[in-house]
Amino acid sequence: MIRLDTEVVREIALLAAHCDDLAIGMGGTLLTLSNAVAGLRVRALVLCGAGTERAREERAALEAFCPGADLDLRVLDLPDGRTPAHWEKAKDAVAGLRRRANPDVVFAPQREDAHQDHRLLAELAPTEFRDHLILGYEILKWESDTPKPTLLHPLSAAIAAQKATLLMKHYPSQRDRDWYDELSFLGLSRLRGVQCRAPHAEAFVSEKAVLTFGGS
């Protein structure tokens, strides 16, 4: 397995349509980065959920998934399931995130996601973050839209277990969904781990990246 290592990541930008998308898609990566980089700057935008219990869940969850990080979370009130009809507001929100962030990596939904709200963000991300590495995360759900990842981030068994535990702890509003349980999250991360010879992993899709051989 060919490994590509990054330089130190000091700041990341996170784009999500709904509260819990980030934790489901890349909770283990957030834990890993926050544990590895003291004072990691996390600039996060969530389009839906402002003024609801979901927003309160999201803030508590991201604080747990990003321990010790400098976290700036903005949750908007766009309607769940109808954000493409509010394209201008979504575009302005992503542009606002770009103005207040200088990220080393941008995380957004992957472009082939079956949910229209997720796809909108995947399409908007590169229009504002034009010179950044953008990694599309996968969101486990009922639809059969699991992507073929181009990048895999290995996770230890302990981090994978911590992710699953935090998901169950911080999003009680989602526990009535028949797929929302620790076995589901651990099953997917174990599958991704098999694909990169690690105990567990999270998967990402990169549409474009520059690879330099032999240093700068």
Image (cartoon, helix red, strand yellow):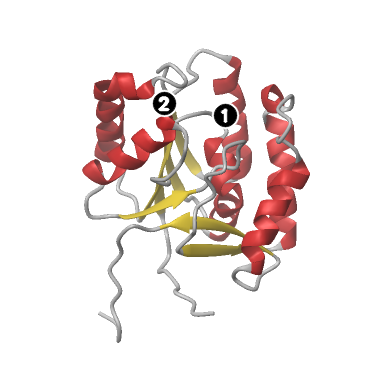
Counting from the top left corner in percent of width and height, residue 107 is at: 42, 48
Compared across the picture, whether 18 is left or right of 31 comes to: left
The residue pinned by badge 1 equals 58
Compared across the picture, whether 130 is left or right of 133 comes to: left
- Residue ranking furthest to the top: 51
Counting from the top left corner in percent of width and height, residue 147 is at: 50, 53
Q: Is residue 137 visible?
A: yes
Q: Nearer the viewer, residue 187 or 23?
A: 187
Q: Which mark is residue 194?
A: none
Identify the secondary structure beneath mark 1.
Answer: helix
Q: Nearer the viewer, residue 54 or 42?
A: 54
- Categorize mark 1 by other alpha carbons within 10 Å: few (<14), some (14-19), many (20+): many
**Quadrant housing the C terminus:** bottom left
- Residue 209 figure quarter: bottom left
Q: Nearer the viewer, residue 173 or 59?
A: 173
Compared across the picture, whether 3 is left or right of 200 comes to: left
- Categorize mark 2 by other alpha carbons within 10 Å: few (<14), some (14-19), many (20+): many
The residue pinned by badge 2 equals 47
- Residue 207 figure quarter: bottom left
- Residue ranking furthest to the front: 144
Compared across the picture, whether 68 is left or right of 121 comes to: right
Q: Is residue 23 above or below residue 34?
A: above
Q: Nearer the viewer, residue 176 or 199?
A: 176
**Quadrant housing the N terminus:** bottom right
For the point 47% across and 17% down, the residue is 50
- Residue ranking furthest to the bottom: 214
Q: Is residue 35 above or below residue 79?
A: below
